[in-house]
Amino acid sequence: MTSRSARTTARTSPEARAVARTQTLIKGENGIGTVRKTTLPGGLRIVTETLPSVRSATFGIWAHVGSRDETPALNGATHYLEHLLFKGTSRRSALDISAALDAVGGEINAFTAKEYTCYYARVLDTDLPLAIDVVCDMLTGSLIREEDVDVERGAILEEIAMTEDDPGDCVHDLFAHTMFGDSALGRPVLGTVDTVNALTADRIRRFYRKHYDPTHLVVACAGNVDHAKVVRQVRAAFEGAGAFKDAVAEPIAPRSGRRGVRATGRVEVIGRKTEQAHVILGMPGLARTDERRWALGVLNAALGGGMSSRLFQEVREKRGLAYSVYSYTSGFADCGLFGVYAGCRPSQVHDVLKICRDELDRVAEHGLPDEEIDRAVGQLRGSTVLGLEDTGALMNRIGKSELCWGEQMSVDDMLARIASVTPDDVRAVARDVLGQRPSLSVIGPLKDKQASRLHDAVA
């Protein structure tokens, strides 16, 4: 990935290094879209993107921890902790946290993924100091009390039950297990009923202290914001909470990870009384740092990214075999997934799988015609820009970029990278990715004879 940033070389003197380092990573026109980064002496990184034309701001803190960092016994701890940070600090109760944002018409939330966690608040630009104070307080001053752990356990078990009731969601967890087995990447982000019931306040506190050090955090803020003011407010919040353990510390490097165990030719089926069968046919994809990811993005758009895509046309438009059918990619630090999802009547499962497999094989062997690739490039460029039209999306982009890549890329650079993808690039990545033997995950009311035939789809 290209970047307009240059890493500041650390000075040898600790005294000299105990100074905040500020860089302009992307210089926008007339200050619009300018991305700046300050690294505090304690290792906390603060990245902002300035958009003077809007009246809102989104403030987030990204933590370098996800379900991938859990042992089997701790499965679900990262997500559990995400819930608990909303339960109160020494300065605010749980009601105080939510009421503070409600009173100004803002929103506050969080999400946990396999390799990171994010806490964020979106407010009017004039209320940004409040959002900074509340979110920083949550991250640095959480009490994680025994009674809160017990209360929130019930809410998390209900969330697990809600996911189990949605087979279209649950099948993605099943596919991760199909591909990665009983590894950290293969286990569900929410954990299981057994692991959540086994987690104690003491174990979660230890997990919190280990992974929420400032060196593991990235602050991201986008909207009508002033970088210097954001830095001062964040620094005051963290120093006031005594969060900087060391006067001088360097941020943790982007995750490299160990290559996840990836399966091919595996089939996993969960029998369930549902109206539809939910299927994912897929194979190993690309790591998020792989330069071929741009070509894979174009391939994904052409295969199953829109109404004109091959899979949508073949499965839904021409045959009416499914209402929802699409392809997707997931990239992790050292590996990835490519999958095709479809929801269909149980009696149509084998027909849908055959069409999808035939299309994947055809594209792997013969590639895509230039006109389909050109259309996919245009679609991907347009969706990239349209997906960054609010401050929340911009905050996500700059925060995730700093945490996962350690650099920033302007929208113009992203569009240029997509436009530079050639038909040969797409055909090459199609051979590499789609040419692999797929695996299959299915949830639905399949009879034994139907289930036994599923292996034909991955043969």
Image: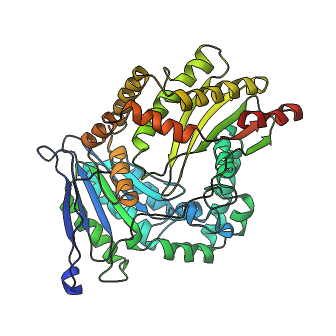
Q: Residue drawn at (22%, 61%), measured in percent from left and top?
A: 6
Q: State which quarter of the image contains the C terminus.
A: top right
**Is 309 placed left or right of 321 in the picture?**
left
Q: Nearer the viewer, residue 50 or 176?
A: 176
Q: Residue drawn at (26%, 43%), measured in percent from left and top?
A: 413
Q: Is residue 420 visible?
A: yes
Q: Residue drawn at (35%, 27%), measured in percent from left and top?
A: 378
Query: In the picture shown, does residue 191 fall above or below 209?
Result: above
Residue furthest out toward the top: 318
Quadrant of the rendered image containing residue 275: top right
Total marks shown come to 0
Q: Position of residue 154 (x, y in %)?
A: 68, 58
Q: Position of residue 343 (x, y in %)?
A: 67, 29
Residue furthest out toward the left: 30
Q: Position of residue 43 (x, y in %)?
A: 32, 73
Q: Position of residue 355 (x, y in %)?
A: 66, 24
The color scheme shown is: rainbow
Quadrant of the rendered image containing residue 402: bottom left
Q: Nearer the viewer, residue 341 or 243?
A: 341
**Is 115 placed left or right of 274 in the picture?**
left
Q: Residue drawn at (14%, 47%), measured in percent from left and top?
A: 31
Quadrant of the rendered image containing residue 279: top right
Q: Is residue 91 visible?
A: no
Query: In the picture shown, does residue 218 fall above or below 429?
Result: below
Query: In the picture shown, does residue 378 fall above or below 414?
Result: above
